[in-house]
Amino acid sequence: MNENIKRFSYPYIVWISIVIVIPVLLIFLYSFIQSTGEPVVFRFTLQNYRDFLDPIFLNVLWHSFIIAAISTAICLLLGYPVAWVVSRLKPHRQSSALMLFILPMWINMLLRTYAWITILSRQGILNKILARLGMGPFHMMYTDFSVSLGMVYNFLPFMILPIYTSILKVDGHLIDAARDLGASGSHVFRKVMLPLTMPGIITGVTMVFLPAMSTFVIPQLLGGGQYIMIGNLIERQFLLTGDWHFGSAISVVLMAFILLSVWAMKRFDGGGSQAGTAGKGALPW
Amino acid sequence: MKKWLILLAAVFLVSCGGDQRPRLFVYNVGEYMDTSVLEEFEEEYGVRVIYETFDSNETAYQKLKAGTTAYDVVFPSDYMIEKMIKEDMLEKLDFSLIPNFENLLPEFTYLEYDPKNLYSVPYFWGTVGIVYDTRLVNGSVDSWSALWDERYEKEIFMYDSQRDSLMVALKLLGYSLNTHKTEELEAAKSLLIKQSPFVIAYITDVVISNMIAGNAGLAVVYSGDAAYIMDENESMEYVIPKEGSNLWVDAMVIPKMSNNKELAHAFIDFILRPEIGLANTEYVMYSTPNALVLEELEGEGWTENDAFNPDLSKFPNLEMFKDPGEFVAEYDRIWIEILAGAK
């Protein structure tokens, strides 16, 4: 039986080697070589990485990290209560509520993001409504605000779903028991719910932070070029400048940065949910 | 189950084998052609046109260099054509197959980027200038320095293209837009970073819808986009600043890797027909180098318009971009520093 199932995984292994493993290896290779002007002769070099140590690029990396971290934090603050409320609904209501969060994702991401331009512009819908109320106009488009908003809007479902799943797994009797023993509402949350749902939180944070850190479409559309993030830098190296070696080096740096963040979060999980019984099953790796 | 499979296979076969017409791969700038003329071409020649678009010359160059699609006709700009000729990427044209070449105005052929006019056929031309909202700007704008005016804080859109934005600063400083001096580029960089608090954003095509909606007071735009904006929003005005600006020509070329060169020539000739040229001009609103199209437009209020058809003798300090060669690395570096430093 086990052997049979294994056989079904072969197409997946072939697929993943072609579209993920080989390209990643190529990026690694490209980042360490330099063309010599002759077609097939390359030289090993660390120069591409040295170039990245320029304060300007480090600044871009730092700024990307800050915006991604802020967006992830907002997603968590919004997503946790929402997941909680949904999990307390009647079962048939729950699935329709979840549907409401997933529904917008059926629309192309570019369209959804473009729509915000119409809403946030100076002559946009929001400013028109505010003008009726005697306020504004506010400068919202092409700012840190619009970029973060675009990210929160696009990535929020990735936060809600894993947290919702982990809340469902919590045994309701534990909460009742805590209550019976005299724990206050905030006590129950901090000492029981939070540790038990930590795996969901970690998964949600990871699934929001990773795309937020590397996206280039959202800062491009809603940041108006002046919010250049690490993803935009990589895009420019490949599409405009044509320096594939430097672009690859930045990609490798980004990958290392993300792996490091995931590792740090896993460590955090190990410390935080010792009391938990839900385990780490919710982590995808 | 079996029946379904057979049906599925049949659908597959039909959809794959249905279209036996020869294919022509056209690669043009976005929103830069009335695509109904493509259907006309398809019908007349019994071919299928695969039409793809790009948003900057640099993108197009990278795509051609990668060689993944064998494009037959491409529409790059002057300096990029110069670079492609230098790198032996373009086919010499057979002008006996392009009789409509004689429809073109002489001042737009045999230009610096292709001095013997062996590789390219001009498609549209234009300038770069400032489009501004007359309700916001008192008096008229005539200098690039308006983009550094404190009164217009957060009222300015710049163009997200390194050559165009650097051009603005270089011209204001009185330098050539083809400078090869690092210190002049550094001066332009400081000027642009100084400007960044006044700028709302660096954007490309969305500048059109933004200016029509009135989301900013001033914007750096291409002349044809300006003509379109002014057509849609009456309070907008276009000016070519007195310090001078960029004069550009976009032209049709056939890459060496084209598989269907004869048809590519036919397509170029087709585009030069007066009625096709007119349809495209009315659609994109850029300046046409086609004398017959210009005749058709006479008396419609277009030919007196500086955005659509500036009298070049009135603007002596317009310059065309040249391929910077290896020096492009300096432009790239300076531009990234501006974008990363502007906040």
Image (tube, coloured by chain):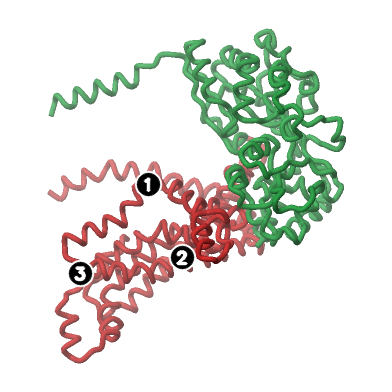
Chain colours: A red, B green
Q: What residue type is labelled 1?
A: Ile
For label 2, the SS is helix
For label 1, the SS is loop
Establish if B326 lies above or below B10: below
Q: In which quarter of the image is residue B56?
A: top right
Position of residue A3 in the picture relative to residue A281 (left or right): left
Q: What residue type is labelled 3?
A: Lys
User: Which residue is more in the foreground, B63 or A37?
Assistant: B63
Please indicate, yes or no, whether residue A197 appears anywhere in the rendered image. yes
Establish if A88 lies above or below A181: above
Name the residue beneath numbered marker 1: A107
Residue under the image location 58 percent in, 12 percent down: B262
Mark earlier in primary sequence (2, 3): 2
Residue under the image location 35 percent in, 16 percent down: B18
Q: Residue furthest bottom?
A: A182
Which dot, 2 or 3, sits closer to the camera?
2
Name the residue beneath numbered marker 3: A169
Disc 1: host chain: A
Q: In which quarter of the image is residue A35?
A: top right
Q: What residue type is labelled 2?
A: Ser
Disc 2 from disc 3: Cα separation: 26 Å
Disc 1 from disc 3: Cα separation: 30 Å
Disc 2: host chain: A
Label 3: few (<14), some (14–19) or many (≥20) C-alpha neighbours in 10 Å: few
